[in-house]
Amino acid sequence: MTTLIAEVVRPATHAKVRILATADRLFYTEGVHTVGVDRIISESKVTKATFYKYYRSKDALIVVYLQGRDRLARDFLASLDTRFDTPEQRLRGVVTEISAQVIREGFHGCPFINAAAQFTDPAHPVRQAVAAHRDWYGRSIEDMFRGMGHARPGDAADDFFLARDGAFAGANLGDPIGAHTALLRAIQRVLDESGD
């Protein structure tokens, strides 16, 4: 017998999850500053009191949204360890996923870059959540290059990050095929350096 998650989740928890799911969709498609709390409340079908019971402010909800996106990225990278045997295969798995994302219908860029662009203070909790994600991601990519025996794994990770960010921005601005193709060329150049 299959049990639906909705059947075992407490109603209060369900409201919290519904708020976050609504915010995730709206923040990603429309931007974190564009979407107001009243709209999130309306579309998640909760009261204002329920919203503020779980999220003390919109900024707090944005941080939780980014933490959720960070968890998805961490889970994805962890899944590569079970699917691939070598660091190069894992890195190519990352590139394959990024390539698929930039040409996917409904792609709106990197949620972390998008959020960071709307908060200028590096001490703001949103920017701190973005920085924590990017630091972790950069270290993870650097570890893959190090595992491949790349002579300059830190530089390679920086090049990878720049290519990835460029592909995300280019695709979001309207040229997903060009972004996809340029990403593959740039990453191949970085991978070719590992054989030098």
Image (cartoon, rainbow, N blue to C red):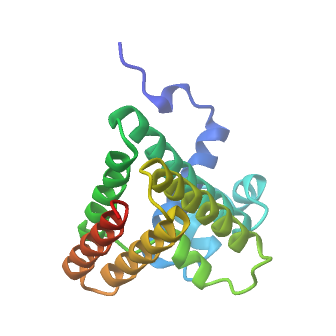
> Residue at 66% of width from left, 68% of height from top?
131
Please determine whether, in this image, residue 2 is positioned above or below residue 89. Answer: above
Please determine whether, in this image, residue 58 is positioned above or below residue 15. Answer: below
> Residue at 45% of width from left, 74% of height from top?
159
Q: Quadrant of the C terminus?
A: bottom left
The x, y position of residue 168, in whole percent, is 38, 75
Q: How many marks?
A: 0
The x, y position of residue 155, in whole percent, is 51, 71
* Res 186 visible: yes
The x, y position of residue 40, in whole percent, is 57, 66
Q: Residue furthest front?
A: 196
Q: Residue furthest top?
A: 1
Q: Is residue 190 left or right of residue 117?
A: left
Q: Is residue 175 left or right of residue 146?
A: left
Q: Nearer the viewer, residue 185 or 41?
A: 185
Q: Nearer the viewer, residue 46 or 194?
A: 194
The x, y position of residue 120, in whole percent, is 70, 87
* Res 45 visible: no
Q: Nearer the viewer, residue 5 or 139?
A: 139
> Residue at 35% of width from left, 12% of height from top?
1
Q: Is residue 59 left or right of residue 169?
A: right
> Residue at 46% of width from left, 46% of height from top?
77
